[in-house]
Image: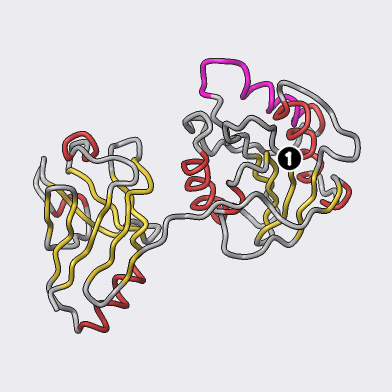
Amino acid sequence: MSDFGREDHYIAAVKGAILRQNPSINIVDISHEVKVGDIGQAAYLLKNVFREFPKGTVHLCAVDRMAKEPSRQLALKVEDHFFVGPDSGVFSLISQERPMAIVDINIVRPIMSTFMSKDLLAPVAANLASGKNIHEMGKPVDSVYELFARKLKVTKREIAGNVIRVDHYGNLITNIEKKEYETIQKINGNVAFDITIGRESVGTIHKHYADVDSGECFVFFNSLGHLQIGINKGNAAELLGLKLDTPITINFHV
């Protein structure tokens, strides 16, 4: 995964560096359309997809924060998956479990490069994918650079969250999770509610896009368990005038 885009040779160069070391490695693209330096977007994508791969998979994340000082370059093991990339804060947002191992991969024999993804990350990812021990890749460190995700405000009367992702279709994905909604509804006895979306209000959680007519707003819990808002056959972000971090609230009638 990277913020390289697809117009240049960067993706192919990184893949070539991996395959040059071990031509039998199977490389799967997650996304190369992450906005440049967008740590939140990178973390959202990686968090929601890495468990779909077999344990032992190596995930190379070539997205770094736009900072004056260069980030450390790390390899870590989390939930029996391996991750390689700059210590940008992404790795602090992908799991609530503590890493099983963290190593600085550019401290024993440091290199200076304008293309660290090809010259450092790719060889390390290839070594891990080839079965080498993570502790052979560098020097152990205690922690990763830590960022904190937005927290929900949850009471008996409301769940207040935010839009955390606007996808390719203009759907608005929030940090309000189905388990939180079900818990509060169980406490309240399944009362009526309304969902405040900008200047709009919806009183139903739908099952599918097709539950509403073309051009109408739908709200449902997606396959990841997040409250998602969209327009059937339309772009919700544009039509509703909403964007990343927009507040979304479920108000319970108690």
* Mark 1 residue type: Arg
- Between 150 and 232, the one lying in front of the other is 150
Q: Main secondary structure of the magenta part?
A: helix
User: Given the current orientation, which residue lies at the most extreme top position?
Assistant: 8
Q: Quadrant of residue 123?
A: top right
Front residue of 197/218: it is: 197
Name the foreground residue: 11 vs 192.
Answer: 192
**Residue at disc 1, secondary structure:** loop
The residue beneath circle 1 is 72
Quadrant containing the C terminus in the rendered view: bottom left
Quadrant of the rendered image containing residue 104? top right
Residue 203 place in picture, x, y as percent: 12, 62
Q: Determine whether, in the image, residue 28 is placed left or right of residue 18.
A: left
Q: Position of residue 224 (x, y in %)?
A: 40, 58
Colouring convention used in this rendered image of the protein: secondary structure
> Is 144 displayed left or right of 167 in the figure?
right
Q: Examine the image and state in which quarter residue 61 appears.
A: top right
- Measured as percent of width and height from the top left, residue 45 is found at 49, 45
Residue 97 at x, y = what percent? Answer: 62, 65
Residue at figure coordinates x 27%, y 52% from the top left: 247
The span picked out in magenta is 5-19
Q: Residues within 10 Å of mark 1 (few under 14, many from 20)?
A: some
Asked if residue 47 is among those painted magenta in the image, a careful observer would answer: no
Count every numbered label the image shows and give the total. 1
Above or below: residue 104 compared with residue 235: below
In front: 215, or 173?
Answer: 173
Q: Establish if 95 lies above or below 121.
A: below
Image quarter where the N terminus lies is: top right
| Residue positioned 28% across, 53% down in the render | 228
The residue under the point 68% across, 28% down is 15
